[in-house]
Amino acid sequence: MSATKDILLAQIRNGGTLTTGQRIKLCLMLSYPAILAQLSSVMMQYIDTSMVGHLGPAAGASIGLVSTCLWLMGGFGMAVTSGFSVQVAHRIGGNDFKGARDVLRQALVCVLGFSAVIGLLGAAVSQQLPVWLGGGPDIVADAGKYFLIMSLFMPAMILDWTCAAMLQASGNMKVPSILSVGMCLMDVLFNYLFIYKMEMGVVGAAIGSGLAEVITGVLMFSFLAFRSQELRLTQEKGSYRPTDTVVRKALDISGPMALQNLLLRGGYIAATVIVAPLGTVAIAANTFAITAESLCYMPGVGIADAATTLVGQSVGARRKDLANGFAWITAFLGMGIMGALAVLMFLFAPQMMGLLSPDASVIDLGARVLRIEAFAEPGYAAAMVIYGAFVGAGDTRWPSVMNFGSMWVVRIIPAIFITPIYGLVGFWVCMAVELTFRGSLFLIRLRRGTWLKGVV
């Protein structure tokens, strides 16, 4: 199967003809390893959250309180990574493998430097952050410790994401997927050791997850640097000094993504502030419901990764027709899979919450909001996968505006007024409406084709 995938990818680079069936086959071949990796990540989250959740609602709430801020930090890292990985995909699509390795070298320097800075900033504010977010006295201490430890592990996490993104840009979805599954297994073992055997609670969860990321990051980098057929850095000597051309292009791509991350993730932080006054049970139910929902949306993340790779290589090969075709195929694939999983989520919402918490009130509230969110999953899939396709084309400015505009205007502002009246259910209604609206926006932009007008 790997040989077939390589042949089809070579057809993109070399101007060969791909039938509709071959395009669909290639989308599936690149998507399924990424979906497997994301599903393994979901299982890791389920097991982690279940381990912490069985310590009591306060433990789960302490992690949930600061998780959105960790997403914000990670989002900046992913934005910087994309600025370079998209260039790698374009160069590989144009058969410029040496140029791709030059970009990779510069990416490693820039990304690691950036991740060190952002990790130190996170550590500096770790003790004050839970208070700023409105956490109660029963959770702020554990929340601060958890955020401190995860901030210190941030460079290892972003290295892992960067190496995975580079391998995916080359068309290699298998290795990142296998290593992601391995990371999940390590995370479970480490968390069991630190949370229960060493009785470290929330702090143990942070240490266990961080160590799993470190080991995975080292393995991912080792394969990328020494074994990747397309990107192996030992193929020739090259400079690691960032150049103006590559850095400026990276900024053009990642700049709008970073701004979007600030405003979009800022919306998630605002959501935490909106939910926090509802109490520990609501914070825990919200946290666990987000973890449960990831069973639906993580496959969409994997398909979006495949869309970025396929569109990126097609754009690098100057083949707009293929780029547009891959965008539509992956969008329908994501909507179909996430729609099917949403049906299962609606039917088994109480059981899914029961795996994460033994508290009856948390289970009941979490199941109610999950069933509301199930109706929004197809729209969420459209927004997620199509955004991945746009990133592959280097089109990030207007999609970023669409993302954060939808988040703040359609979700956050109404939620400020609705949540105090209808509680967590009201907040998730706002979320479901916004995700459906956002998906519609992305489908309209995809249909108009303006995202490809800047491609030469």
Image (cartoon, grey):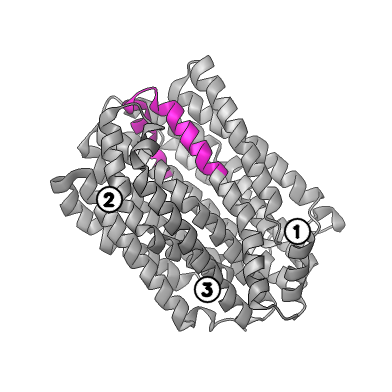
Q: Is residue 184 above or below residue 87?
A: above
Front-most of residues 111 and 311: 311
Per the image, label 3 sits on a secondary structure element best described as helix
First of labels 1, 3 by sequence position? 1
First of labels 3, 2 by sequence position? 3
Task: Please give the label number shown on residue 1.
Answer: 1
Q: What is the quadrant of the C terminus in the image?
A: bottom right
Q: Nearer the viewer, mark 1 or mark 3?
A: 1
Q: What is the quadrant of the N terminus in the image?
A: bottom right
- Could you tell me which residue is drawn at 48 percent across and 32 percent down? 48
Does the stretch in magenta take in 201?
no
Per the image, label 2 sits on a secondary structure element best described as helix
Query: How many C-alpha atoms fall within 10 Å of the one at disc 2: few (<14), some, or many (≥20)?
Result: many
Q: Residue 441 lies in what quarter of the image?
A: bottom left
Q: Mark 1 to mark 2: distance in Å?
A: 42 Å
Query: How many C-alpha atoms fall within 10 Å of the one at disc 3: few (<14), some, or many (≥20)?
Result: many
Residue 25: x, y in percent?
66, 67
Per the image, label 1 sits on a secondary structure element best described as loop
Q: Nearer the viewer, mark 1 or mark 2?
A: 1
- SS majority, magenta: helix
Disc 3 target residue: 328
Q: Residue 186 lies in what quarter of the image?
A: top right
Q: Mark 1 to mark 3: distance in Å?
A: 23 Å
Residue 225: x, y in percent?
77, 50
Q: Is residue 43 above or below residue 253?
A: above
Disc 2 target residue: 428
Q: Nearer the viewer, mark 3 or mark 2?
A: 3
Residue 145: x, y in percent?
43, 28
Task: Please give the label number shown on residue 132.
Answer: none
Magenta range: 40-69
